[in-house]
Amino acid sequence: MTTTDEAQSSWELETGLVHDVDAWIANARFGLKEEYAAKVLESATKEDEGTKGLMFMFDLADEAGEIIGSQGYSVGSGWVESEDGSEMSHPKRNNVVMTCQYGRLQSRTVKDLHVNMQARGLPTVAAVWDGLGFHWMQEEHETVGGDTKTGLMPTLLLAEKDVKAVAKPAAKAAAKKTTAAVIDEANPLVAKLTKLAANLDQSAFTKTALQVAGITDDDALMAEVLDDGEGGFWATHQV
């Protein structure tokens, strides 16, 4: 039995990646993604000492303000994020190298799409990207190692949106903090976990948090850390 091309299309596979969409940048920050950071550390040489795989990250919101995905772009070696992840700095340079993904994102935005980013501020300040809208496509690019990979890049500038009106993934969860967490905001242990939650993705946060001294002595806090739902520690501490 043969089938038409139209019928066969139901069996085609998708990458699962955000692709060919209109979306706006929200919650831009500098931080770490566990998988990428692990790969960077694994391949780091002596000259790369201090490299930890910092990334420029943000959420993507659709026309209705719903988060449809999150993206991360490598920023190159030597960069260090501020405590809240809002800025990054480098001991030797002020500009991002053109070979990293954040450099490619900057080049596409400024040179190809002619967005006046200079008027918005510095590329080392994450918030300059908040509210910008683009049509996004997955595009192939060659890595430093010579491999070919795909990455999400803007192809068309859209009208800017008020980022404050864009819903965060954990916006509803923020109101669900447990009593223990609210009472202990001044607790050094909670403060340390809060900083981790602001700079790591959920998976990396959970694994790192479980290594923090004293966490196993607090059953209530431990339960919050292990909760990966809307009421968990990570979700309710996305600032």
Image (cartoon, rainbow, N blue to C red):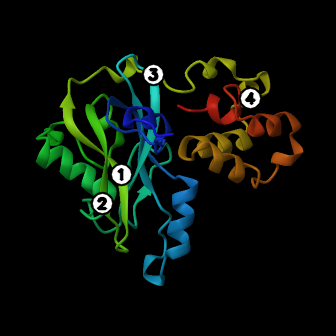
Q: Nearer the viewer, residue 172 or 215?
A: 172
Give the residue at x 77% y 34%.
224
Sooner in the amino-acid sequence: mark 1 or mark 3: 3
Tag 4 residue: 181
Sooner in the amino-acid sequence: mark 4 or mark 1: 1
Measuring from the top left, give residue 68's x and y in whole percent.
Answer: 45, 30
Kindly report the distance in space between the C-alpha atoms of the residues bearing marks 2 and 1: 7 Å
Q: Nearer the viewer, mark 4 or mark 1?
A: 1
Kindly report the distance in space between the C-alpha atoms of the residues bearing marks 4 and 1: 38 Å
Q: Secondary structure at mark 2?
A: strand
Q: Are marks 2 and 1 in contact (CB under 8 Å)?
A: yes
Residue 141 tag number: 2
Q: Is residue 198 above or below residue 164?
A: below
Residue 218, picture quadrant: top right
Tag 1 residue: 151
Residue 221 falls left or right of residue 46: right
Measuring from the top left, give residue 152's x and y in whole percent.
Answer: 34, 46
